[in-house]
Image (cartoon, rainbow, N blue to C red):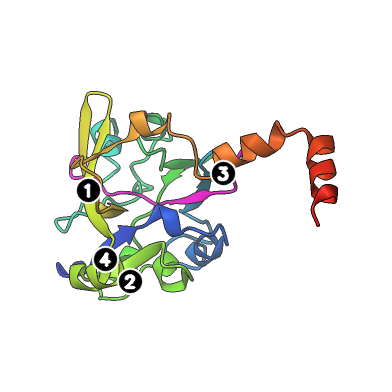
Amino acid sequence: MAVPEHLEFFVDPGRCIGCQACVQACTECDTHKGHSMIQLDYVNQAVSTQTVPMVCMHCDSPTCAEVCPADAIKRTEDGVVQTARKPRCIACNNCVLACPFGVPKMNTGMNLMMKCDMCYDRTSVGLKPMCASVCPSQALFYGTRAEIEKLRPRSRTTNTFQFGEQTIHTKVQMMVPIEAKAEYVDVTAAMQDPPIGQSILLEMANMDWDAFVSAQEMQP
């Protein structure tokens, strides 16, 4: 079986509410042996509670597979990059270091690299990945292009990411504002952007609270 061509995985990071439902659901996938293959990353924990779900983006030319000396990581014909095959994985960590998205994780207890495989046991038979099936805000969405366009009229999709001089195309689609001019996400440049709400928080941190209280007391 293969993942149906009309069904796609979409990530809308701006809708993540940090509930961890996806993390818990991922542990229940039959092929994960109780381990979660998804994580929530803080954008900038010092100034914002904004989180971003991090799943495998399933690159068209997966760097993790390219640097694997044991040929343990395979990409299926339908574009899903599988987790490392245990008989071949030598736990060298090459894939962990090479992935620009920081997805592969080494399970030291099993001497095995494990990562999101888009719940291949489910998606290959037309079911949703576990994470997308429980996400209450639909930050993780699995469905057709027509469905996501109807749900997100002010967003568009992209699957092209720029890391310095490296351009990466992925099977997973990222939702970006429709007015965004660039046809790709410049990841390294975006690292310098402040999180939403940072300026407000900084103003609050620098505020003269005695003056603020006095001003409030003077109001009728």
Give the spatial CA distance, label 1 vs label 4: 18 Å
Nearer the N terminus, badge 4 or badge 2?
A: 2
Residue 165, image x and y in percent? 22, 23
Res 198 seen here: yes
Kindly identify the residue that appears in the image at 44 percent across and 65 percent down.
131
For mark 4, does the 10 Å Cα neighbourhood hold few (<14), some (14 to 19), or many (20 or more) residues?
few
Mark 2 or mark 3: which is in front?
Answer: 2
Q: Nearer the viewer, residue 38 or 95?
A: 38
| Mark linked to residue 153 | 4
> Would you say the residues marked 1 and 4 are in contact, meaning their CB atoms lie under 8 Å apart?
no
| Mark linked to residue 122 | 2
Label 1 amino acid?
Asn
| Mark linked to residue 159 | 1
Q: Which residue is mark 3?
A: 109
Q: Quadrant of the N terminus?
A: bottom left
Residue 18, image x and y in percent? 56, 57
Nearer the N terminus, badge 2 or badge 1?
A: 2
Res 1 seen here: no
Residue at the outermost front position: 220
Kindly identify the residue that appears in the image at 23 percent across and 67 percent down.
149
Label 4 amino acid?
Pro
User: SS class of the residue under badge 4?
Assistant: loop
The range drawn in magenta is: 45-61
Nearer the N terminus, badge 1 or badge 4?
A: 4
Residue 90, image x and y in percent? 39, 35
User: Is 61 on the left-hand or right-hand side of 218?
Assistant: left
